[in-house]
Image (cartoon, rainbow, N blue to C red):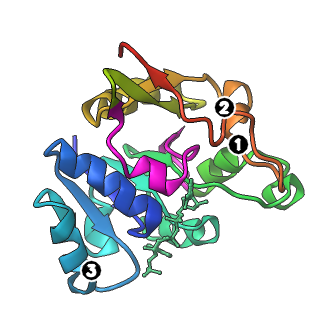
Amino acid sequence: MTYAVIGFGSIGQALAKAFARNGIEVSVATTRDPASFAAEAAAIGPTIIPKTLAEALKADTIILAVRFEAHPDIAKALPSWQGKTVVDAMNSNLPLEEMNGLLSSAFVSQAFNGAKLVKGWNHLLAATLATDPEVDGGHRVVFLSSDDADAVPPVADLAKRLGFAPVDLGKLDQGGALVHARGRVWGPLIFKDMFKKEQ
Ligand SMILES: NC(=O)c1ccc[n+]([C@@H]2O[C@H](COP(=O)([O-])OP(=O)(O)OC[C@H]3O[C@@H](n4cnc5c(N)ncnc54)[C@H](OP(=O)(O)O)[C@@H]3O)[C@@H](O)[C@H]2O)c1
């Protein structure tokens, strides 16, 4: 399994730290030339590989850590998303009417046609996400939700390898709604920093 994080701002770098902490290789990409953020990537760790967007999108599992408005540009960068897993770490405060009446991850899923989409790593502040998720023998919870049940176990596996305790909330518009922002209303699990004693 190969991984990429698209976006290397607050959330992208917080995720990169988790990969580095566990010695797992991940490509990172932005709109910029990879040389322009190579020093920041190297400072996080040797397993953080800066790439162009086109190169990074060759990964099997791609985590979206860009502002919501940027996701259509990334979706257009590949002719087909078949065979890819897209992890949506974004939040949108757009009203539902501006997203075809859908919660944001279902809307994103339409743009990444053919991909398996899992929502995850969106509920914590970047500063929290950047810290070690293993605290006092407990593991920081990451909520996962998807309309494709088969897509969740490999992402849950990654979460465990990164030191998190994955919790499957089920479908996007069911348990997943608890971690969605709607307009200016945050889902009740957003910003809840929870720990599980056992994975
Ligand atoms: N910050 C938080 O505490 C927090 C918490 C939970 C969830 N989130 C969500 O996480 C997402 C990222 O937030 P952030 O705070 O990390 O944003 P950010 O600091 O502004 O970083 C966004 C990154 O995306 C890159 N980018 C922009 N357009 C791109 C494109 N078309 N292709 C590739 N890369 C692109 C930017 O790089 P260039 O512009 O240089 O290309 C930058 O590295 C948002 O959807 C936000 O709602 C944020």
How far apart are the two marked residues, 1 and 3, measured between alpha carbons? Answer: 30 Å
- Is ligand 1 closer than 8 angstroms to the Cβ of mark 3? yes
Q: Earlier in the sequence, mark 1 or mark 3?
A: 3
Residue of label 2:
176
Vertical position of residue 154 compared to residue 19: above or below: above
Q: Amino acid at mark 1?
A: His
Q: Is residue 79 visible?
A: no
The secondary element bearing badge 3 is classed as helix
The secondary element bearing badge 2 is classed as helix
Tell me which residue sits at (70%, 50%) in the image: 104
Q: What is the magenta segment's predominant secondary structure?
A: loop
Q: Is residue 179 visible?
A: yes
Q: Are marks 2 and 1 in contact (CB under 8 Å)?
A: yes
The location of residue 48, given as percent across then percent down, is 19, 61
Residue of label 3:
37
Quadrant of the rendered image containing residue 41: bottom left
Vertical position of residue 188 compared to residue 6: above or below: above
Quarter of the picture containing the N terminus is top left
Quadrant of the rendered image containing residue 183: bottom right
In the image, 121 versus 134, the foreground residue is: 134
How far apart are the two marked residues, 2 and 1, measured between alpha carbons? Answer: 7 Å
Q: Amino acid at mark 2?
A: Gly
In the image, 162 versus 132, the foreground residue is: 132
- The magenta stretch spans which residues? 112-134
Judged left or right of residue 27, residue 151 is right
Residue of label 1:
180
